[in-house]
Image: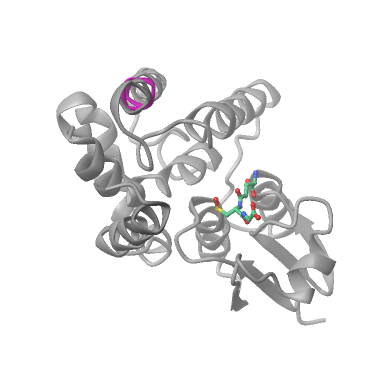
Amino acid sequence: MVDEVKLLDFWPSMFGMRVKIALAEKGVAYEYLEQDLRNKSPLLLEMNPIHKKIPVLIHNGKPICESSIIVQYIDEFWNDKAPLLPSDPYERAQARFWVDFIDKKLYDPTRKIWGSKGEEHETGKKEMIEILKKLEEVLGEKGYFGGESLGVVDISLIGFSSWFYTYETIGKFSIEAECPKIMSWVKRCLQNESVSKSLPDSKKVYELVVEMQKAMGVN
Ligand code: GS8
């Protein structure tokens, strides 16, 4: 049976990017269905009735939700190439721990880097740098979080890099200056076609955020 794979996504989403990278790593062809999050489609509401969020992977008609769960599903289903999780149970647990850390700490919708000013904004910036510095320690001297090649932790984190230009421009700071090892890691990841083809243009993300700030009355 030929697998029917569909991805419900919204292009600037770092969560959707994870799924695109995982599918590209495994060489899985799929249909991309861009979603309007201000006017959610009946398909999105049917496929993710609990959270009503993208990304959703629809595999042979069945939905899988939550990007980290989707990436691990992809790794388990298409297990013939490009393993994304380590085989050792302890290392698997560690990889899952850092994915969870990125989900809970780096992505904090209450953190204000844009859409805010003053103290709140400064705190948001400081927190983000601290988290990236912690991840830099975890990376250590390795090429990738997964060791020699891309793994689940790399895939969870790399999408955020397409937002770095926005954070830096609006926040007036340099991630390269604060976290040089993370930036070298970003460049290394981008040498993989699965990553470079899945990440949007950083300037396009910035333009979108500027538009959103205007709409919110912040500039
Ligand atoms: C987060 C997905 C998410 O926030 C995951 O898949 O990992 N934990 C989830 N999706 C957002 C767009 S990207 O910021 C979304 O779909 N938002 C629509 C809404 O909240 O109504």
- Display colour scheme: one colour
User: Is residue 188 shown left or right of residue 135?
Assistant: left
User: Is residue 19 shown left or right of residue 143?
Assistant: right
Report the magenta residues as a range: 124-129
Residue 18 place in picture, x, y as percent: 53, 53
Residue 7: within the magenta?
no
Residue 182 place in picture, x, y as percent: 29, 33
Residue at 56% x, 26% y: name it.
101
Q: Quadrant of residue 148?
A: top left
User: Is residue 8 shown left or right of residue 179?
Assistant: right
The residue lying toward the viewer, choosing from 45 and 211, is 211
The residue lying toward the viewer, choosing from 145 and 39, is 39
Residue at 60% x, 35% y: name it.
86
The residue lying toward the viewer, choosing from 1 and 10, is 10
Residue at 33% x, 35% y: name it.
143
Outermost residue toward the front in this view: 217
Q: Quadrant of residue 181?
A: top left
Q: What secondary structure predominates along the stretch shown in magenta?
A: helix
User: Is residue 90 shown left or right of residue 106?
Assistant: right
Residue 112 place in picture, x, y as percent: 41, 33
Q: Considering only vertical position in the picture, is 74 above or below 38?
A: above
Residue 198 place in picture, x, y as percent: 43, 64
Q: How many marks?
A: 0
Q: Quadrant of residue 150?
A: top left
Q: Considering only vertical position in the picture, is 160 above or below 36?
A: above
The residue lying toward the viewer, choosing from 134 and 192, is 134
Q: Quadrant location of the N terminus?
A: bottom right
Q: Considering only vertical position in the picture, is 107 above or below 80?
A: above
